[in-house]
Image (spheres, rainbow, N blue to C red):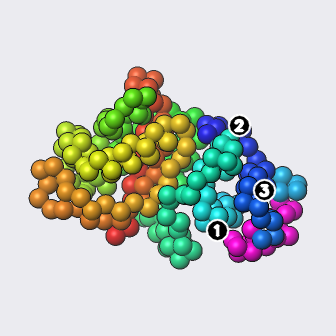
């Protein structure tokens, strides 16, 4: 995936490629996504900005990952998305929650803020410093890696709050002890993020952590973004927000 917004392909072109791949017309796509054909057609024809909300609806209607639209992957590599699409009701709820939290505390980090920090800092970890305790950070997987490696835990991250302590060794041991299928899925997600893709998903966790008395059951939003550190190389930042 392209790291810089200026290098990314125009999403309207990607929408047209998607239509050809799926053998549907743009009008049919608009109908499925609940969009106005005239509006989207004019935006694409004049290469105007296409709102994120429109892209989200297209992504949901076609079961296509949002990250694909900003990548250079050919349509032939499209597979069914493993991302649970957000319903309109949930999207609105999250948006209102974000606005409320920002009104109460300007230092609260959410997915939108993290993405802005990434672009404004050029993807450098130093730009995240004021919010570093709200995220967990992992080493970007390298070729041949078979496990995730924890770099640091934030004292205010969802993981620390769930485990009721900030203990890198405990988190590493819990990840290593997870069922093989879950370990491999997590590793694949972080490998995808290491390529420069923003991975934003709804996750469900039902597992036991090492040295933790209670079984952890929760649904949460997870955003993975690659940041680069001058001292430590590529790292994956994990921002997770509890849903229930």
Q: What is the magenta range?
A: 29-43
Asked if residue 41 is among those painted magenta in the image, a careful observer would answer: yes
Residue placed at 73% from the left, 55% from the top?
21
Dots 2, 1 in contact, CB < 8 A: no
Q: Dominant secondary structure of the magenta stretch?
A: helix
Q: Which mark is residue 92?
A: none
Q: What element carries label 3?
A: helix
Q: Distance between the residues labelled 3 and 2?
A: 23 Å
Q: Nearer the viewer, residue 167 or 195?
A: 195
| Residue matched to label 1 | 61
Task: State which quarter of the image contains the N terminus.
Answer: top right
Q: Distance between the residues labelled 2 and 1?
A: 26 Å
Q: Which residue lies furthest to the bottom in this view?
A: 89
Residue 119 image offset from top left, x and y in percent: 59, 41
Residue placed at 53% from the left, 66% from the top?
85
- What is the quadrant of residue 51 in the picture? bottom right
74 with respect to 85 (left or right): right
Residue placed at 15% from the left, 62% from the top?
214
Q: Residue 7 carries which label?
A: 2
Q: Work out whether 118 lies above or below 69.
A: above
The mark tally for this picture is 3
């Amino acid at each position: 995936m392209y790291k810089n917004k200026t290098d990314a392909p125009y999403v309207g072109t990607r929408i047209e490629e998607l239509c050809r791949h799926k053998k549907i017309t743009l009008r049919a796509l608009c109908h499925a996504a609940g969009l106005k054909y005239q509006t989207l057609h004019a935006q694409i024809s004049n290469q105007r900005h296409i709102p994120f909300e429109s892209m989200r609806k297209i992504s949901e209607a076609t079961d296509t990952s949002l990250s694909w639209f900003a990548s250079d992957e050919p349509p032939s590599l499209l597979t069914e998305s493993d991302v649970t699409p957000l319903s309109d009701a949930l999207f609105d709820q999250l948006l209102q929650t974000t606005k409320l939290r920002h009104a109460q505390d300007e230092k609260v980090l959410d997915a939108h803020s993290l993405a802005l920090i990434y672009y404004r800092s050029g993807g450098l970890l130093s730009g995240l410093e004021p919010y570093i305790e709200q995220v967990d950070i992992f080493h970007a997987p390298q070729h041949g890696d078979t496990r995730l490696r924890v770099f640091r835990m934030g004292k205010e991250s969802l993981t620390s709050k769930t485990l009721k302590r900030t203990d890198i060794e405990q988190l590493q041991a819990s990840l290593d002890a997870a069922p093989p299928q879950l370990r491999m899925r997590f590793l694949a997600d972080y490998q995808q993020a290491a390529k420069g893709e923003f991975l934003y998903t709804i996750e469900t966790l039902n597992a036991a952590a090492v040295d933790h008395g209670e079984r952890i059951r929760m649904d949460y939003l997870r955003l993975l973004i690659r940041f680069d550190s001058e001292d430590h190389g590529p790292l994956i930042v994990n921002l997770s927000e509890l849903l229930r």
